[in-house]
Image: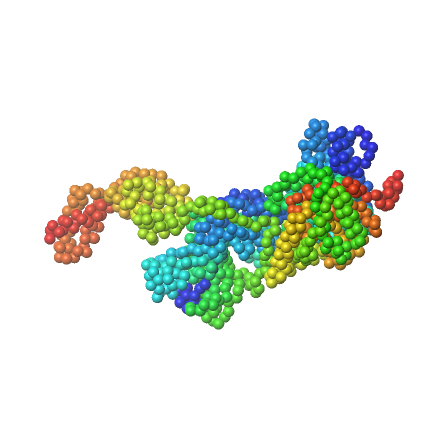
Amino acid sequence: MAVERDLWRLSAAELQRGLLAKEFSAKEITESALGRIAQADPEIHAFLELTEKAAYKQAARIDEALSQGTARECGPLFGVPIAFKDNMNLEGTHTTCASRMLENYVSPYTATCVARAIGAGGIPLGKLNMDEFAFGSSTETSAFGKTLNPWDRERVPGGSSGGSAAAVASGMACVALGSDTGGSIRQPGAFCGAIGVKPTYGVVSRYGVVAFGSSLDQVGPFARTVHDAACTLNAIAGRDPLDCTSQESTVDFTANLAEGVRGMKVGIVPAFMEAKGLSPEVRHKVEEAAANLAAMGAEIVEVALPNAQAAMSAYYVLGPCEAFSNLARFDSVRYGYCDPGHKDLGSQYEASRTIGFGSEARRRIMLGSYLLSSGVYNTYYYPAQQVRTLITRDYNEAFGKVSCILAPVAPRTAFKFGEIADPAEMYLTDMFTISINIAGNGGMSMPVGPGEETHLPIGVQLIAPAFHDELMLRAAAALETVYGPAPIAPDFDGLNDNAKAGE
Amino acid sequence: MKTLEETLRTWEAVIGLEIHAELTSLQTKMFCGCKLEFGAPPNTHTCPVCLGMPGALPVPNRAAIESIVLAGLATNCEIEKHSMFYRKNYMYPDMAKNFQTTQGPIAFCMRGHLDLAVDGAAAKERVDLGDCAVGEQCGNVTRTEDGYVAHVGITRIHMEEDAGKMVHFGGDEGRIAGATHSLVDYNRAGTPLIELVTEPDLRTPAEARLFMQKLRQIYLALGISDCSMEEGSLRCDGNVSLRRRGETKFGTKTELKNMNSFKNLHDGLAYEICRQAEVLEEGGIIYQETRHWDPTMKCTIVMRVKETADDYRLFPEPDLAPYDLTDEFIEGVRAKLPELPDEKELRFQRDYGLTPYDARHLVEHRETADFFERSMECAGDDAAAFAKPLANRVNNDLLAYLNNHAEVTLDALPITPQRLVDLERLLADGSISTKQGKEVFAALLEKDCDPAVIVEERGMKQVSDSGEIEAVVDEVLAANPDKVEQYLGGKTGLLGFFVGQCMKATHGQGNPQLINEVIVRKLSERA
């Protein structure tokens, strides 16, 4: 079987067609993917660990099934190379959350989403870089080096799932899983020009995904086509008895993608479009996408989310509070970094956590610890929960009028490393995504081509009513007919140089 | 230091209890599927959830919720339909997540109460009831013939998880102070625990002990916990403060730990009350602190001083949805309520004609109460006549034996309800004497044997043949003419002497009642 094209460039659907047509094998897909990683990752640094053995083992399983004619029964991801954000446990691999604290931590068990993706036939490639414990919007807080934006290596890939977005955008992984607490799938998706889906809270089990903000975290896929994203979601969605916040999922997310948007009411939020800090090129792209949807028969309707501007404040109360408590378990006693030589528990705790955690993690822990302390709780935590109720109500009202909302993902395109040093300014990059986590419904980033000014990828955000994620996927699929699937970033000069040097 | 009684004349003790019970009858832990088993090798019943591994999530044990609702219904609590789990944040290695999952301001069970019947010696600790007439209500107590009934409020019963067990080495007597290293066993981590908090309604150590005993009976009747204070499945902390009699403001309280038996609970509280009184009487002040009862030294020792209230940063547990109990669920649980000790006590009085005292003491122990009931069934038509003697036998002899042999359970003894009834029949028809009855009873505890056979084997059959008895009496009277003379002269106290002589002559087997009758008759014939 001669392989004449780079298999790593293919979408999941193309890979599966080729497999079924016996044009190539799962082993060849795996070789191609790992080869692409070997070629591109030294430059991009999206991976923290590779799982080659597991990948080949899975490929053999798929090839065996192909020879038996039972490949489809493996599941919706059969033969699809997939990689996982490093906050997802996969038994036997390191799960570091890109933190010194967990540098040597080896997972004793596998997260449900990972188990389902592999169970559905996905070929596990490895674990992906991220902001430490998912605290950040640029992947710069990783303790294990930065990940470069495949479109411009002087720029960040976004975050916190920067590794996942960069891996998919550079063709190293066909699909990847990320997690989104305030925009951590959608914003890096936008920065890297990949599709990034944050489903409704409860669609995907969080069991085995290291928690940041338990009431906000949600796992979702990155892909280069809407179909691939929907297909991955099919594999990982659904009730998990190990996560009591997960829900039954009966939807086939790939089913109605081709239905189009004729007659669909799509909301635009004027306050978002007029927001201070929104760059003209991003606004222009959102308007262009709206016009394209309208041209395909959608009705564009203005909707108001009057309380959405309070989302950021509520998020920076609720997020740190939950993070403070979730990160308390990293105490150097049972696992994780343990600073040696301490005579008493208190100083061991203090030293281990000071050294083990990076500055952003420490900042959020301190913030959460303060916000939850008695006397302060009623001033912040409680009102933040009230804001949450109001924002949820806003979305419910808006979705009484429209099936889907179109909005920016990030106010601007990818910024340069070190460009945003002020944490508060960094937090603003999530201004359009955070309210969705607060309300709990689904949102996704859909690449709509490069901006006219920066020539960097821009994503528009599609927001769906809770547990109707298929609606935003349908609108995204309509946009895909205009903009095409997300392109793989052209190789860097550096990569080309290396390639030349290798000749 | 003054005695408790002296102290309580001047001071009123205000006591509240916090009672933790592990739901040992459940199969699995509170938030994961790990098996509950006491005494398993360390860290063999653990998983990512109860070890607090990164990414693990809790899933509540439904059966545990049912147990706590049972406990609430049995202690007259209101069941809150809408309640939530909270995270109580504090760092300690026995709590793997470094937060304990517990409940917030609203627990599953709120605002309950238990009524305690206090009598005998226990009632004497209440030195302030001198002016309270029988039937009168004085504060939270109602005076009765032989003591009083105290109405004790229950603030709440909430659901939480237990911590792991720590063992410290190299320090003093296994305590953490001075230890060189510590080990943690997480088998216990995540064990479902219900914590009952009382109102500060208790006034004496005896009341505290009775409350604890009563709660234990209830939990045992519900079958939700094995309630072993020794193994720690039932634990009690006491909050104690003093105020001068007549004062209404509460004094500063101390929290007392390590009271792992009813006796320790009583003695620890009694000591602490006397200690506080002494400090106060010498012009000192009580610090809010946690103290440890040392049963060997018979004193309480400071564990830690609480200068400021602990800040546990309590907030709703986002990994667990708020709990909504339906009426259907609550009624379903109510339907499973077994007969509770109070109800059983009333039924024993009503159906068997027992005195309140006998009934109460019978139901104090489920095993003996059951044994009594099964004996009553065996008694058949004689049940009414046998109720009192059977109750006495169980309450006195059987219980005494069990108390003196802590390692023995009633199930393991050869005695059966039928054997006990057979024994009572031998006593009722005069075949053996009361004294012989005790001997036969003791034998029944030792071996599986028919009482009639024991009587036969030991040749202890009571002589109730009147002809035989008359002959013996005639002999004795003939041998003691001077005593007969004195008796007839009015010294009737000599009757006992004659009976004793006759018993001696029958080698203790004569029926004393019959002998008595015959002597009296024969002497009166001579008069």
In this picture, is A315 found above or below B469?
A: below
The correct choice, above or below, for B455 with respect to B258 in the image is above
Residue farthest toward the bottom in the current orientation of the protein: B283
Residue at x-position 60% and y-position 45%: A244
Q: Nearer the viewer, residue B388 or B426?
A: B388
User: In the displayed structure, does residue A33 sit left or right of residue B417?
Assistant: right
Q: Is residue B343 visible?
A: yes
Quarter of the picture containing the N terminus of chain B is bottom left
- Residue B93 place in picture, x, y as percent: 60, 53
Q: Nearer the viewer, residue A97 or B272?
A: A97
Relative to A100, say whether A239 is above or below.
Answer: above
Residue B437, horizontal then vertical, whole percent? 29, 45
The reply to whether residue B38 is in sight is no
> Which image quadrant is residue A293 in?
top right
Q: Position of residue B344 (x, y in %)?
A: 37, 48
The mark total stands at 0
Q: Residue at x 61, y 51 (%)?
A: B318
